[in-house]
Image: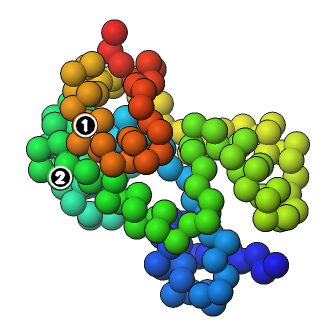
Amino acid sequence: MIVREISYEHANGEIIRDQIDPTEDLIFCFVRHPLTWYLSYWQMRQNQGQSDREGGWIDTIIDLPFQSFIKSVIQEKPGYLSNFFNSYVSRCRAIGKQENLREDLNHILSLLHIPYDRQSLFTRSLVNTAPSNEKYSYNLALELMKSEEEIIRRFNYLYIPLEVLDV
């Protein structure tokens, strides 16, 4: 088995195909619940300076207050995250969930017979987290989930994580 690290931090399946032999198709990725993904993305961008932004459509509305940001996504680009995820999962043989990152990565690496330090995987501190005080109203959460229905159903995200709700 050939194990290769791809240089681009968030390379989708098509980018990877262009960089490696097409027969090497043991590519995997991770998805995340849309409600936590949008909240995390918005908070991460709030913590970055203006010069650190990539300039995609979503970054044109990122300076809006959180609730307005989500409403803009729903109104202007419903299914934005579904389309984004589709570009990543299209070539993947395995798809894990961010919510079960350690367990799913352990399972994938074991299936692929890729050597790794299992203890380190399960004991390492979390990195790249962006805590936020922002929350969704219940109705806004439902609206966003409806606009992302494709990935809600495809990846079985048929629930609302309580930690994102303003209750």
Q: Position of residue 20 (x, y in %)?
A: 61, 87
In the image, is residue 101 above or below residue 142? below
Residue at the limit of the structure toward the top, as seen here: 167
Q: Residue at x 81, y 37 (%)?
A: 123
Distance (Cα) linking label 1 and label 2: 12 Å
| Residue position for label 2 | 77
Q: Residue at x 12, y 50 (%)?
A: 76
In the picture provided, is 70 more to the left or to the right than 130?
left
Q: Position of residue 54 (x, y in %)?
A: 33, 64
In the image, is residue 163 above or below residue 149? above
Instruction: Tell me which corner region of the image, top left, top right, bottom left or bottom right, holds residue 139.
Output: top left
Q: Is residue 46 among the parts visible in the rendering?
A: no
Q: Determine contact: label 1, label 2, CB under 8 Å.
A: no
Q: Position of residue 167 (x, y in %)?
A: 34, 9
| Residue position for label 1 | 146
Q: Residue at x 46, y 68 (%)?
A: 90
